[in-house]
Image (spheres, rainbow, N blue to C red):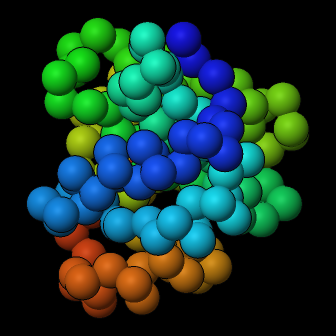
Amino acid sequence: MLRKAHIADVKDIQKLLMTFANRGDMLSRSLSELYESLRDFYVVEEEGVILGAAALHVVWEDLAEVRSVAVNETAGRRGIGGRLVEACISEAREIGLRRIFCLTYKPDFFAKHGFRLVDKAELPHKVWGDCIKCPKFPDCDENAMILDL
């Protein structure tokens, strides 16, 4: 079941994200950050277990980021990540955004959802606020992608 995240999901979301953050595949998120951004998150839950999470984080009047897309490795290849990204895209349209972006190591996955590769320099400086927390800063090796809505 795909739904907006609840307070009770935060620790499970963090545990899921840390699986990937510990490998350097995404930024870690503190419990404080997750509680503050809870309304950004969607989850896929099955029998009380969070199998996937993703967030739509509004950055500016016409721009948001799809971030923290993670699916439990035991639940891979079931379309969970795609459903989460599509939920974020749908919400972005509903609230009137014109563009959404992502920073990713999986450009083929996001391309399937209409995102296109762009030079990171095309993104406004405001989007780099989280980058300072990244151990790879300033030598980011993620791909920047944009979806025009």
Q: x, y (%) of residue 8?
A: 60, 41
**Left or right position of 99 against 62:** left
Instruction: Using the image, determine if residue 110 lies above or below residue 80.
Output: below
Any part of residue 134 in sight: yes
Instruction: Using the image, determine if residue 35 lies above or below residue 8.
Output: below
Instruction: Using the image, determine if residue 120 lies above or below residue 54.
Output: below
Which quadrant does the N terminus fall into?
A: top right
Asked whether 108 or 8 is in front, the reply is: 8
Q: Residue at x 84, y 60 (%)?
A: 61
Any part of residue 81 in sight: no
Q: Residue at x 44, y 66 (%)?
A: 29
Q: x, y (%) of residue 12?
A: 42, 43
- Residue 133, image quadrant: bottom left
- Residue 142, image quadrant: bottom left
Q: Residue at x 79, y 55 (%)?
A: 62
**Left or right position of 142 against 111:** left
